[in-house]
Image (cartoon, rainbow, N blue to C red):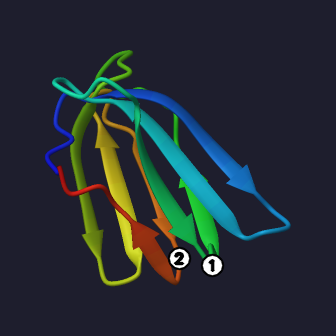
């Protein structure tokens, strides 16, 4: 699923369960899209806004066991986990 220009609504972590959910509003999707990480070992969410404020996604990719979401603000959200549930459409 292409998440470019999606709007980041929230990042939710459940410490006890070791899960995280990234909730996004994606053009053409009626309901928010949820990307779920299971077996989370690291979650980092920078919010320094070097390119200016934005709630929009520039790019998102899963490489191995790491999800990296680059925001149009220039910040990144990085989640390392055992697995990811990413909607395909």
Q: Specify the farthest residue to the right.
A: 16
Q: Which residue is mark 1?
A: 39
Q: Quadrant of residue 50?
A: top left
- Image position of 29 with respect to 77: above or below: above
What crowding class fits label 1: few (fewer than 14 Cα within 10 Å), some (14-19), or many (20 or more)? some
Asked if 84 appears above or below 14 in the picture, the reply is below
- Seen from the viewer's position, the closer of residues 39 and 88 is 88
- The disc placed on residue 63 is none
Q: Residue at x 52, y 84 (%)?
A: 82
**Outermost residue, top direction?**
53
Residue under circle 2? 81
Residue 26, given in percent of the width and then of the height, sits at: 26, 29
Q: Secondary structure at mark 2?
A: loop
Residue 32's x, y, as percent? 40, 31
- Depth check: give the residue in front, 62 or 49: 62
Q: CA distance from mark 2 to mark 1?
A: 5 Å
């Amino acid at each position: 699923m292409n998440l470019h220009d999606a709007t980041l609504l929230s990042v939710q972590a459940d410490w006890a369960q070791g899960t995280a959910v990234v909730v996004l509003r994606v053009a053409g999707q009626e309901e928010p899209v949820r990307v779920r990480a299971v077996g989370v070992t690291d979650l980092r969410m920078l919010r320094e806004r070097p390119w200016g404020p934005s709630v929009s996604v520039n790019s998102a990719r899963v490489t191995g066991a790491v999800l990296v979401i680059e925001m149009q603000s220039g910040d990144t959200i990085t989640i390392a986990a055992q697995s990811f549930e990413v909607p395909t459409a």
